[in-house]
Amino acid sequence: MKNWISKEKKDAKDFDGRRNKGSGNQWFRPGDLSIPGHNLLIECKQTDKKSYSISIETLEKLYSEALFSYKIPILSIQIKDIEVVLMFKEDFKKIILKNLK
């Protein structure tokens, strides 16, 4: 099984969601994962290299797809064995910081 498929399956389990058919390649079903009951658009990326480069095009695509879907864009990245989640700062402030008060 390809590593990116394993990443999507693991994220679907970790986020209690399901993989989108076509891995988000259809305009009416953007993103790699759907999470029932939550307004998140999750895109999964994986590499076995020592680094992963995020381009402005990737971020703009993620943002515009999330905006179109009325969802919050999330980028889930695995670099070797380390996993991180990337959010836009305004979304982080609205969700995370609001819950800390």
Image: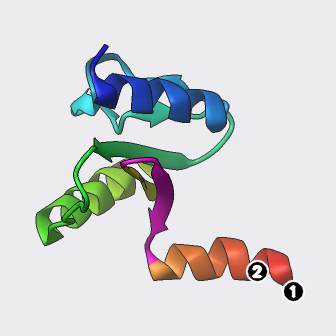
Q: Is residue 48 above or below residue 88?
A: above
Q: Which residue appears at 49% of the width and 53% of the height?
A: 83
Regarding mark 1 in the picture, which secondary structure is present there?
loop
Give 18 or 51, whichever is nearer the viewer: 51
Residues at discs 1 and 2 in contact (Cβ within 8 Å): yes
Residue ID at (59%, 34%): 35
Residue at disc 2, secondary structure: helix
Identify the image quadrant of residue 63.
Answer: bottom left
Residue 84 located within the stretch drawn in magenta: yes
> Which residue corresponds to mark 2?
98
Residue under the point 67% across and 31% down: 16
Q: Residue at x 48, y 24 (%)?
A: 9
Q: Could you say where residue 43 lies in the image, as x and y percent from the top left? A: 37, 45
Q: Nearer the viewer, residue 77 or 80?
A: 80
Residue 60 spot, x, y in % from top left: 21, 65
| Position of residue 1 measured from the top left corner of the image (x, y, whole percent) | 31, 13
Colour option used: rainbow
Q: Based on the displayed image, in which of its 4 quarters is residue 6 positioned?
A: top left
Kindly identify the amino acid type of the residue bearing the numbered disc 2.
Lys
The disc label shown at residue 71, or none:
none
Q: CA distance from mark 1 to mark 2?
A: 6 Å
Magenta highlight range: 80-88
Q: Closest to the observer: 78 or 17?
A: 78
The verdict on residue 65 being magenta is no
Is 34 situated left or right of 98 in this image?
left
Callout 1 amino acid: Lys
Q: Which residue is mark 1?
A: 101
